[in-house]
Image (cartoon, rainbow, N blue to C red):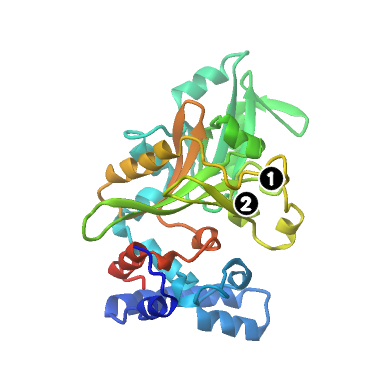
Amino acid sequence: MLLTETDDLARFVAERGTGKIRKARYDAAFAKFKKAVSGMKISSGHKSRCLTAGFGPSRSYLYDFKTYHPSLYLNDIERRMTQLINGRYAIVFHDKMLTSQVLDAYADVPTVHAFSKKGRVEFWSPEFLRLASQDSAEMTIFMKPVNGAGGKGAMRFKVRGGLVETDGRMIPAKEYIEDLAASRKDLVFLHCLEQSSFMNSLNPGSINTVRLLSMRDPETREIFVPRGVVRVGNKATGPVDNFSSGGYAYDLDTETGIIGRGQAKKDKTAAKIQGHIDDPDRRIEGLRLPDFDRVLKQAITLHECLPFANYIGWDLCLREDGISVIEANNTTDVDVIQMHGPLLTDERVSRFYRHHHII
């Protein structure tokens, strides 16, 4: 059910909870938000407005406050509070190695070729060791921090005949990975997936994904998917498609599968790449996402397989022969969703967040 009467809806959502649990969580989240805002290069007046409203500075142009009352948006303090929804099981989604091992029983996930901890490689997959010893073998590996977010620290490299080319030199793949591990925090090295022709056509230089937000209804315990986006990378984002890194996010109607308007952050980086795939020959707005029904069912079915989880942000890779789960996240960046419309206009979503002491 959509709450469409603006005044009634604003009153319904504006009545944020006043219980002790929410207050304690809000105060803790506010302290972290205040610290983040204090470090921003904006005027003191702007900082004060951000702290009063609960929104970071970019929300003034990402969100449509002219059409929707600010109370209909999950603010940035409340977004931080959503990290507590899954309770002690949040670790399953924070630790990418653990996520892969848990989901491997239910879904297609990228093969973990290596895993490093505290600067040392602790695990090599038998497949990697076999391919790395073959002169004719070739594979692409995607590396990312075990506890990373937003695509930060991610990179992609090719292994040919057991060697990696770097700075004009060819060095053994194992040595190359060990060098990366020694200079960074905990890392996971994954087999790089091949995306479908449709997703590849959006930007061949990155793995372009579908982000779906799934929730467990507190009363019925049924899973529902209220919102989604199609994320597309570009030259600025490198091998990832993350919106926070400058990528594009297209609205995805989770009822019909129709792709909507695309948008990037309006900063100096994004301004240089506007129009990347919205030119007349490469426009995707208005198209239906290929195999959407299967994509939606995948997210719902997988969430049902994880009875301990109430809230998951899925990153799905569409392949020609199926769907792979790149990540299952403990929470989601709400800006990438709410720039296409506030979350709290959906009564199911509002009641979900209220049940979990978020609003």
Q: Secondary structure at mark 1?
A: loop
Residue 296 picture location, percent across and down: 40, 42
Instruction: Look at label 1 and name its amino acid.
Output: Ile
> What residue is disc 1 on?
277
Q: Quadrant of residue 135?
A: top right
Q: Is residue 231 above or below residue 71?
A: above
Front residue of 162 and 206: 206
Front residue of 40 and 68: 68
Q: Residue at x 51, y 40 (%)?
A: 289
Front residue of 98 and 16: 16
Residue 246 picture location, percent across and down: 65, 54
Residue 261 picture location, percent across and down: 59, 54
The mark closer to the camera, 1 or 2, is: 1
Check whether the beta carbons of the residues at disc 1 and disc 2 lie within 8 A of each other: yes
Q: Residues within 10 Å of mark 1 (few under 14, many from 20)?
A: some
Instruction: Look at label 2 and name its amino acid.
Output: Tyr
Q: Quadrant of residue 158?
A: top right
> What residue is disc 2 on?
248
Residue 145 seen by the camera: no
Q: Quadrant of residue 142?
A: top right
Q: Residues within 10 Å of mark 2 (few under 14, many from 20)?
A: many
Quarter of the image containing the C terminus?
bottom left
Tag 2 or tag 1, which sits nearer the N-term?
2
Residue 103 seen by the camera: yes
